[in-house]
Amino acid sequence: MGASGSKARGLWPFASAAGGGGPEAPGAVGVEQGLMRPRGRAVPPFVFTRRGSMFYDEDGDLAHEFYEETIVTKNGQKRAKLRRVHKNLIPQGIVKLDTPRIHVDFPVILYEV
């Protein structure tokens, strides 16, 4: 199974105060697991945007997949077939989420009774 965590710059924003290593890291003796102190700006545990999974076509229509109808003549009979369009599609881009989500790398376990 693949991991869905972020691996940008090798820095985990919610690492321990010792610099992101586990108990085997040098200098991590006696340090409890906690949120890393922000060095410049605070890292919120929420995600407000995501990458869109849909595409725009030449007409400006928005969809996950686009198909075009082609006429195929076989044995003197005309048949209509759908062919998937792969060219001239523009990705949707960044989409704002309606409600914020918790980041996948946030180390707190959520529990509801």
Image (cartoon, rainbow, N blue to C red):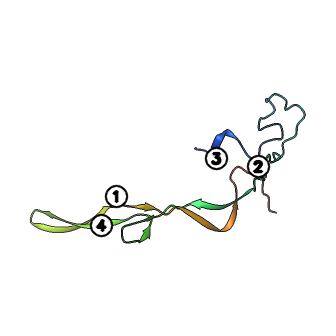
Q: Judging from the image, what secondary structure is the residue with disc 2 in?
A: loop
Residue contact at pointers 1 and 4, CB within 8 angstroms: no
Q: Quadrant of the N terminus?
A: top right
Residue contact at pointers 3 and 4, CB within 8 angstroms: no
**Residue drawn at (38%, 66%), measured in percent from left and top?**
57
Q: Judging from the image, what secondary structure is the residue with disc 4 in?
A: strand
| Residue linked to disc 2 | 107
| Residue linked to disc 1 | 87
Q: Judging from the image, what secondary structure is the residue with disc 3 in?
A: loop
**Residue drawn at (78%, 53%), measured in percent from left and top?**
42
Front-most of 90 and 7?
90
Q: Amino acid at mark 2?
A: Pro
User: Residue 34's spot in the image, x, y percent?
Assistant: 84, 45
Q: Indicate the quadrant where residue 66 lies.
A: bottom left
Spatial CA distance of label 2 from label 1 is 41 Å
Q: Amino acid at mark 4?
A: Glu
